[in-house]
Image (cartoon, grey):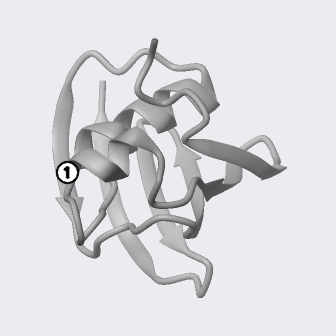
Amino acid sequence: MPLTNNLYTITCKTDSSIDILLADENHPVFAAHFPKLPILPSFLQLEIASEIFDIKITEIKKAKFIKTITPQNKISFKKSNNKIIIESEEKLKISEIIYE
């Protein structure tokens, strides 16, 4: 079973932007990473982006993980060419990924 099963729900989708709502702290990902201080691991940010945009990420050219993502956060994934920016509900940058 993929780690992303029931991890998020897509709440809004356009050609270049997808908004999601994350599961609560009872999801196995958050229970394991980390107990009593659950955050979304960076590798799952990449996996979610790959899934929702239906892209294959074969190489990470550059990645910045600026802020933590916690359970039940509403976040936006924005894609332009080979760049993905993840933003908070308040439109603050959380992560930036340049990939091949």
Residue nearest the observer in this picture, 79 or 13: 13
Q: Residue furthest bottom?
A: 90
Q: Up-down: is 63 above or below 43?
A: below
Q: Quadrant of residue 21?
A: bottom right
Foreground: 1 or 56?
1
How would you rate the neighbour count of disc 1 (Cα within 10 Å): few for under 14, some for 14-19, many for 20 or more?
A: some
Residue beneath the point at 20% across and 60% down:
64
- Marks counted in the figure total 1
In the visual, does 10 lie left or right of 47? Answer: right
Determine which residue is flagged by label 1. 63
**Residue at the image position 69 percent from the left and 50 percent from the top:** 18
* Amino acid found under the numbered disc labelled 1: Ala
Vertical relation: 38 (above or below) 26: below
**x, y percentage for residue 48?**
48, 36
Q: Residue at x 29, y 43 (%)?
A: 98
Quarter in which the C terminus is drawn: top left
The answer to whether 62 is drawn above or below residue 82 in the figure is: below
Rendered residue at 28%/75% (across/down): 67
Whether residue 87 sits left or right of residue 52 in the image: it is left
The answer to whether residue 9 is left or right of residue 34 is right
Q: Position of residue 58 (x, y in %)?
A: 27, 15
Measured as percent of width and height from the top left, residue 96 is found at 33, 58
Please tell me in which quadrant of the rendered image residue 9 appears.
top right
Residue 34, position in %: x, y? 19, 58
Report whether 44 appears left or right of 90.
left
Q: Nearer the viewer, residue 19 or 78?
A: 19
Q: Secondary structure at mark 1?
A: strand
